[in-house]
Image (spheres, rainbow, N blue to C red):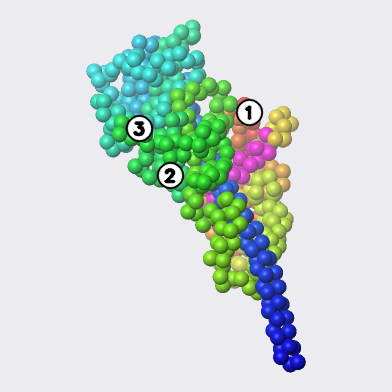
Amino acid sequence: MGSKKSKKSNLYFILSFLIVFLFSFLIFVFYKIQIEDIKIKELKQNEERIINFQNELLDENFSLIFGDINYLNYTCSDNLYTKKNLDEIGENWIEFSNQRGIYDQIRFLDKSGDEIIRVNYENNKAYLVDKSRLQNKKDRYYFKETELLKTSDIYVSPLDLNIENEKIEIPYKPMIRFSTPVYDEYNDFQGVIILNYLADSILKIFKELSQNSQGDISLLNSNSFWLSSKDKNNEWGFMFDSMNKKRFQSDYPEEWEIVKQGKNQIITENGLFTFNKVNLNSDFIGENKNTIYLDDEWYIVSLISPENDLSPYFFDNSLLIVRDIFRKNILSLTLITLFATITSYFVYLNKKQHYKTKYYSEYDPLTKTLNRRAGYKKINKLISKSQRKKVLFSLCFIDINGLKEINDNLGHEFGDELLITVSDAIRLTIKKNDFIIRQGGDEFLIVFDNIATKESEEIWTRIVSKFEEVNKYNDRAYLVSVSHGIVEYSSIEKVELDELVKEADKKMYQEKTIIKKNFNVLR
């Protein structure tokens, strides 16, 4: 009898153990799958973010170049086709080339294809090429393509390696040619402006961004040749007869057919592919109504291979998933670990929500600056330190000029844009310990921590420079203008905060009175 009870107890123990173990294991497996799904989702999103950012990087650089070539055309075209003041234009182009530092050559070819002006950039210095060395380029593809374009149209050549004397230049010099036609007042073709863009810098940044990927990110041309690759031996295959079969399409023929269709993300037996066709959707093109003629198409492709730790979850193979969980979590298959993990997860969610709530209680949602209540609290903390040690800071009261007029005449979306522009310019210029407070409406405070008035004014000058850059280079319907007044707080004087703000406000209005005399916010 005792033996039967013992056997029954043993059986009950074994069954209980198996039930608890299996239940715990199933929960753990389910939990792990959910976690891995989140990781895969984050992995996919990360690859998409990197590729989108690289696309934006190329777009921004192209936009800069489009702006440069339009600027040269707009400022010099009259003198170019009449061939007046060519020496002065050459000097201006030398200065422009030195300032930019990204153009191997800046040229003007007349309607016969003769080089009239050529500025070369070598060893970090630009110079004007002697007239005796100027050549005729009427048979070159970029001249032929550009002379067919209309006013303000821009031709963009393929990205390739520069060739000198019929040989590829060593070290490699990646190059893109941007060109635009020059027309006279009677709309007759008079020549071409050409910028030879040194693409090495943008390719270097492209590769640096690619390091954030868990896979390999490539830049491909329309024939699937590598323009940028983790393996340098893959690059520029179309430039060499011995490498003309070294293409992405050769390694991944089925995937390439899908890549050519545009932005997407697919999983095949070869891994996770994230890709996007480089799209020049810059604001510059839209605002200036330029038509861009690309002589090639580029594709950014990320590949995470099946050797990646998350690859079992790519293919939804239950056996591979369970085996992977056993292999990686031998010491974690207990209820205590499971409970601790789940608890930690919910604590994380709770904490995240707490920070989110706290953020919106302290920050202005439009400008991402501290609101008045939170900002004053932070200033008062600085002041309270003065009871224990010497404290110094400067307070800058600013008022955005003409915000009401912009809202009334252009609409509140333009007013919001102005507020964001001002706060962003300040945020990018001030130091880490400094902070911005939105007083309300068009008024802000800037607190320069441990900085006296003189240095604060120097920082303000740099902030104003950013406003001026916006006014100069952004084609907005209004001007960015801000009045300011700076006062200094010292723990020796112990001035109340309200008095400090009033004093800064008073100085600001003195400046505002002067500015308003000859200022019109609308262009």
Q: Amino acid at mark 1?
A: Ala
Q: Which residue is depicted at the point 50% across and 19% down?
A: 152
Image quadrant occupied by the C terminus: top right
Residue 232 visible? The answer is yes
Q: Earlier in the sequence, mark 3 or mark 2?
A: 2
Q: Which residue is mark 3?
A: 244
205 to the left or right of 91: right
Q: Amino acid at mark 3?
A: Asn
* Image height of 498 relative to 129, above or below: below
Tell which residue pokes out farthest to the bottom in this image.
Answer: 2
Tell me where the magenta segment starts and ends, as one range: 414-434
Q: Which residue is mark 2?
A: 207
Q: Could you tell me residue 349's position as x and y percent?
A: 69, 61
Image quadrant occupied by the N terminus: bottom right
Q: Which residue is mark 1?
A: 477
Query: Comparing marks 1 and 3, which lies closer to the viewer?
Result: 3
Using the image, tell me which numbered label, if any, was put on residue 464.
Answer: none
Q: Earlier in the sequence, mark 1 or mark 2?
A: 2
Residue in front for this viewpoint, 87 or 179 = 179
